Amino acid sequence: MTVTIDQVDVIVIGSGFAGLSAAIEAAERGCSVIVLEKMMAFGGNSAISDGGIAAPGIDYQTAAGVKDSPELMYEDLLKAGEGLNYPELARIVAENAEDAFLWARDKLGVKYFKRVDIFGGHSVPRCYTPETISGLSLIKAQVDLLRKLEVPLFQGAYLKTLLQNEDKRVSAVRIIDDYRFNKHGIGTEKIIHARRAVVVASGGFGSDIAFRQAQDPRLDSSVQSTNKLFATAEVIKECMRIGANPVQLSRIQLGPWASPDEKGYGTGPLFADYVVYPYGIMIDPATGSRFVNELCDRRKLAEAVLVRKHPVIGIADSIAVDMAGWDLSRSLKKGVVKTFQNFKELAEGYGIDMKALNQAICKYNDDVREGFDREYQKQIMPEAGPILKAPFYAMRMWPKVHYTMGGLQIDKQARVINRDMHPIEGLYAAGEVTGGIHGASRLGSCAITECLVFGRIAGRSAATNQSI
Amino acid sequence: MTVTIDQVDVIVIGSGFAGLSAAIEAAERGCSVIVLEKMMAFGGNSAISDGGIAAPGIDYQTAAGVKDSPELMYEDLLKAGEGLNYPELARIVAENAEDAFLWARDKLGVKYFKRVDIFGGHSVPRCYTPETISGLSLIKAQVDLLRKLEVPLFQGAYLKTLLQNEDKRVSAVRIIDDYRFNKHGIGTEKIIHARRAVVVASGGFGSDIAFRQAQDPRLDSSVQSTNKLFATAEVIKECMRIGANPVQLSRIQLGPWASPDEKGYGTGPLFADYVVYPYGIMIDPATGSRFVNELCDRRKLAEAVLVRKHPVIGIADSIAVDMAGWDLSRSLKKGVVKTFQNFKELAEGYGIDMKALNQAICKYNDDVREGFDREYQKQIMPEAGPILKAPFYAMRMWPKVHYTMGGLQIDKQARVINRDMHPIEGLYAAGEVTGGIHGASRLGSCAITECLVFGRIAGRSAATNQSI
């Protein structure tokens, strides 16, 4: 859809949760708004997420007898972030999480399961999943509302340059219209003027191999990403060009639960998270031995695997698979998870030294019987017992880039901050493109909370921008 | 000294180890060179370091029967750096370390003790200290050689702007001449042209509170630095302005051994490193309890203290002080380390709950007697025994910013890399201003090795720059 507008109050770059939230808020304040999306579909990586959102104080929590508070969520965020979080921004996320969830559910009409889940790092259950188990429900609801608000949403519109007026305010964007991802030389340049502000909500850079590898040299092309290929850094770089200060860029979250034998997030994490970690073991095929506490946090797990320089093998038995109760048929069909009738077959299948593997499993089984993992102090789940019953299930495991905690420095009003710690007039940012909220590590299901909370703040700030 | 030259082949920014090494190499290749130092003394933070340098394969090592290799040093660098190091750059440091040391000792004539020391994180002893125990010996030797080479060195010359010609090559600098640190409005602007290149060797940003706090929000003004006040980010920021890619900026090394009751590196680290950690305990005055394994690595130690949000108390008894054998008179004279006749006095001195403190010490003493620290698994050094004999020694401890691992991205030729991963023509960098060599954590005494190795590479690259 060709962009036909050359002047509005607020231009939003990106159509994920953060961008659409910003657009709604700005439009509801009477601004003329457009949303520019470089791809030919709306939603970016938000659309492929499971849509899970964390919030304290929701009625489902009360019903489940869970005691929670913004303060507790704030503390959990800082603990996961190892204290590197911008405390004032993390507090805003925690304090506005309830309102953000109610906005999504009650105003936008997204249907959530009534269950309250707990994910690693949260002190109490406070995570809600849409009934579709997909972020697309919320994206669709946001797009619908924006259409009602008569906000034009353009696809294939790629931000090329941020333009500043003589007062150094970001006052326009140069875009490539009719852009097609990864096809060079297509599209035409256009300039669109922003009377009030530009909101950048272009997502993270998990798929930008050169840019991420500069921050973490281990993350070369052998490391896939759970993100789509379009999760690249061009907007961050363009903001840096006009002075934006990038913070904590080397803090990149890896998913240790991934399989290198399928693309994207895939089906393997189900087997890893719910079967291998609690009830099984991980083996380095080069040594035939365990090498880590399989229940340690995801950062340590991913790093323990990366340092081996090759995929490792997650192994569990039938009892563990039955106990976990998840349907693994998709993984089995894709060949991501394989079954073996005995350890010999399994060792041959992955080129593991049979004797070493046997020894490792026997040792682990002894420890399970005694209830104490002598080697890596993993908490033994006695209910699954030793690894004994055929068929045995196994999966190759190699981390994938999942989320980029670092990004543009912003303040409490979502203003983008420059290298001299002053706001860049007319430029706001929200969502994964920003840095500092999650610090060293993002807590599960808090990304969407952040996108809604700071997306809305950015939209409100842009609508009332005083710098014009 | 007013800058009287307006055109040379190579301009070097900064007069620490890296800058002076670059200037020597460029001058020895027949280039006209000048060194610009913003302060009124040469050497920057290099001059206040102890001058210790790590290198494998030195004759002193052979004499001491130490087996070492560049490969082993490389592995140690990567281990300390948690794999975040740029492997090709770390390898260059390790492979050229011997040559760098011999250059300092045999060519420049710096006298080193013949002893080979080992510091935390090195697999074998490979660290050499100048007989003066000061980096100033090497700085003086470098300045002397540069004077022989007729290289003008200017003090009070502050880099304001990097100027690029129509080919985008860095071809000149705008400086403030007769600059005085922290005095605004003094000095005059001048432009100096660089026929070949500009080498940036301006050091880290450990004392730039705003810039470092943006990367690590915990490092506000309550956290001092062991660096001098002039260790600020203006040159990094100026390089970023023309497109340089900053990497791993949030990786900032803290010294956990510091006292908040004295400035800079100070005298306290001696007591902390050689008495408290091995033979004593650290107590949180708010709880009266221990909170960490006092012998864990310096990053974990510093973070364990920071999270308490107030200084903690390091405590040891007379036996420990005698055993360690260091002269603490300077610390005692300054009041950095204090003595107490009994635990009651000590508890009162720091407002610690007496009962809790007694309990903590008794528990620790029991563990020392049994040879196993049940609470924090610290390795017990049995020779010092329990904490029993008065007088007791104590010091307030609060981390200080020590080193900034992150900085400008460079390649193997010390070329500064831009956000699109291309070299910026005519711009080179070396030393603490660069990032990526040390990854998550710098190994002790490897900073000087890096400064000499990459300083010399930058000088050679600048002298032979083909981009002009």
Image (cartoon, coloured by chain):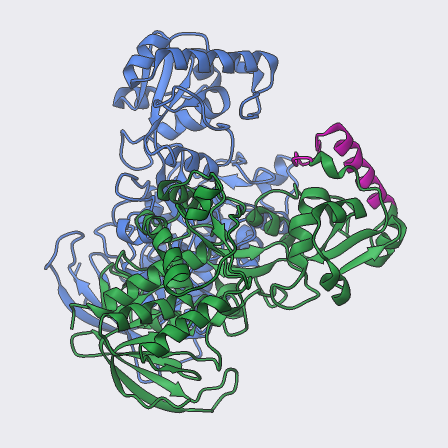
Chain colours: A green, B blue
Q: Position of residue B201 (x, y in %)?
A: 36, 59
Dividing the picture into quarters, in which one does residue A200 lie?
bottom left
Magenta residues (range): A355-380
Q: Position of residue A67 (x, y in %)?
A: 43, 38
Nearest to the observer: residue B411 or residue A82: A82
Asked whether residue A183 is in view, the answer is yes
Toward the left, the furthest residue is: B185
Q: Quadrant of the C terminus of chain B?
A: bottom left
Question: How many numbered marks are there?
Answer: 0
Give the residue at x 34% y 77%: A148
Give the residue at x 66% y 62%: A267
Toward the front, the furthest residue is: A63
Q: On the rendered structure, is B355 left or right of B176?
A: right
Q: Quadrant of the N terminus of chain B?
A: bottom left
Q: Position of residue B434 (x, y in %)?
A: 41, 59
Dividing the picture into quarters, in which one does residue A4 lie?
bottom left
Q: Is residue A51 magenta?
A: no
Q: Is residue A366 magenta?
A: yes
Nearest to the observer: residue A33 or residue B214: A33
Q: Position of residue A406 (x, y in %)?
A: 42, 58
Nearest to the observer: residue B348 or residue B242: B348
Asked if B171 appears above or below A429 in the picture, the reply is below
Q: Majority secondary structure of the magenta segment?
A: helix
Q: On the rendered structure, is B298 left or right of B35?
A: right
Q: On the rendered structure, is B214 left or right of B446?
A: left
Give the residue at x 32% y 51%: A92
Asked whether residue B215 is in view, the answer is no
Give the residue at x 36% y 60%: A103
Asked if B37 appears above or below B376 in the picture, the reply is below
